[in-house]
Amino acid sequence: MPHDPGFPDKAVLAGAWANLAALGARPGASDIRALFAADPKRAQRYSATLDDLTIDYSKTSIDDAAREALIGLTRAAGLSLFRDRLFAGARVNETEGRAAMHMALRSGPHGGLTADTDAGPEDASTLASIELGKMQAFVTAVHDGSIRGATGLAFTHVLNIGIGGSDLGPAMATEALTLSHGPKIITRFLSNVDGNGLAALTRDLNPATTLVLVASKTFTTQETAENAQAARAWLVAALGDAAVAEHFVALSTNRTAVAAFGIRPERVFGFRDWVGGRFSLWSPVGLSIALAAGWPAFQGMLDGAAAMDSHFRAAPFASNLPVLLALAGIWHVNACGTRAHCVLAYDDRLRRFPAFLQQLEMESNGKSTGLDGQTVTQATCPVVFGEPGTNAQHSFMQLVHQGTSVIPVDFVLAANAEQDDRPQAHRILAAHAFAQAEALLRGRALAEVEAEMRERGASPAEIAAVAPHRVFSGNRPSITILFDRLDAFSLGRLIALYEHKVAVQGCLWGINSFDQWGVELGKALAGGLLPDLAPGAEPSGSHDPSTNALIARFRALRGES
């Protein structure tokens, strides 16, 4: 049992990790086909459901002993206590002294979730609901034309300016919820400070009908601040300085900086510091989602996430979907030694989902220092990548099937399509998803390839030359996540599933999933390096030799030496 909320018993935890490693090192431990041969009902015993949502992890090498050891690891790491502290609003983000209470954003006004803050406990559910109420009123007024631009024209476009969690989550969800039926307002997302980004997005925009959202908690994030000023200049050039108050909205807590920018107080939507950036799409950061898809869709997404919160909070670990997804990842990374993880969503509306998960997982758990301040002794987050199926089948899936590294895959698929006029297309899509998972499992032996080639009339020489290249080793793990259909509710539930998976893995690895100090050094160095790039500036020469040389070459190419 843990001695205190932060530090489990080291000896017990070390024993749990050693047990897991020993199971992964057993002869034949990665033989998934043998597990199916020994247990015809394996698919039923190694899957779990929540209503229409099923997670099938039978195509992994987890067996009864491994599952028992993984559950044992949750006890040794104090996962139950961590989950209780998380929902109690304790400061689980220990390095920043904050709670991680994004669950309150979807809990409703009577959710009863509180957050521990320097000022004492806050009623997080009520505070979140009040801000969501302001958002709903604003969205309704924009949609019905009560709120218009400076010239009296209704808004037809939204330009969302943010970066990281203020861009990836809203952009992903907006696309997922509007691709089939079109948005209520066309929404575009600007994150890269490269000037080509703003130029491309505004090329065909009418400033008089464009609403600009600036998503930055501090309102000082360098890339977002620069883009916001550029967008302001674009708007002012067409409509005058007074139009800023009518066309700009801030999703921020820095009211002083927002006011100096020219944004009216009633156009500022804030959130507390217990909302982390990559967990913030449920907050005012998600205003772009609601404007594009409509408030009922945004509320449906909140409801879906709340349903997953309730399940994660109450379900036993052996049937808890986020926990099982997390444990499968732990097994692959720490018992099987995998270093990458692939996500394939077989729905074009989820084409940004892998990019969203890259930030969610790699920024959260890409850590090598434990909560005790010591270097962790086990591997942590793998590299996460993905693309929509079936596109990926014609690109990097070659490596997943026949490469020298084993890469576990999550297949994400809805049983029913939004486009009901093409049922055969969806059956083809599903056939490919299931076939990819089956191919990873079963592989193709040399004898099978040779027999097939002989049947087609290939010569012995051709068989000898080509057959080895058509061999698939198989026994490559995958998980299939299957649900009824992709709508706002199921999208929210899916996102929350992965959010909680990340938190569970962080607890088991003994790291803080809610900070991101790894992004700070580059930002700080960029601020110090910028003066050396100014025209006419004397080079400081204060950087490493390579960087000093690159600065000189950069300035020479610009004619600014």
Image: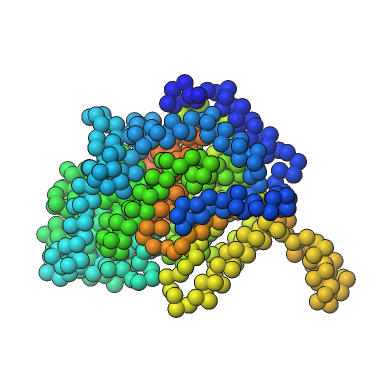
Residue drawn 29% across the image and 72% down it: 204
Residue most toward the top? 3
Residue 242, picture quadrant: bottom left
Which residue occupies the foreground of this view, 148 or 555?
148
Position of 15 relative to 497 (above/below) = above
Residue in view at x 33 percent, y 34 percent: 89
The colouring scheme, among rainbow, by chain, secondary structure or one colour, is rainbow
Q: Position of residue 484 (x, y in %)?
A: 46, 62
- Using the rendered view, name the quadrant where residue 244 is placed: bottom left
**Where in the figure is residue 107, as x and y percent of width and height?**
30, 46
Count of numbered badges drawn on the protein: 0
In this rendering, would 210 be left or right of 552? left
**Is 526 located above or below residue 122 in the figure?**
below
Q: Position of residue 231 (x, y in %)?
A: 25, 59
Question: In this view of the protein, which residue sits in the foreground, 480 or 372?
Answer: 480
Q: Residue at x 12, y 69 (%)?
A: 152
Provide residue 435's location: percent of width, then percent of height.
63, 65
Res 530 visible:
no
Q: Nearer the viewer, residue 481 or 267?
A: 481
Q: In this view of the protein, which residue sits in the foreground, 250 or 439?
A: 439
Instruction: Name the residue at 55% across, 67% down.
Output: 430
* Looking at the image, residue 90 lies above or below residue 253: above
Q: Residue furthest right?
A: 460
The reply to whether residue 44 is visible in this rendering is yes
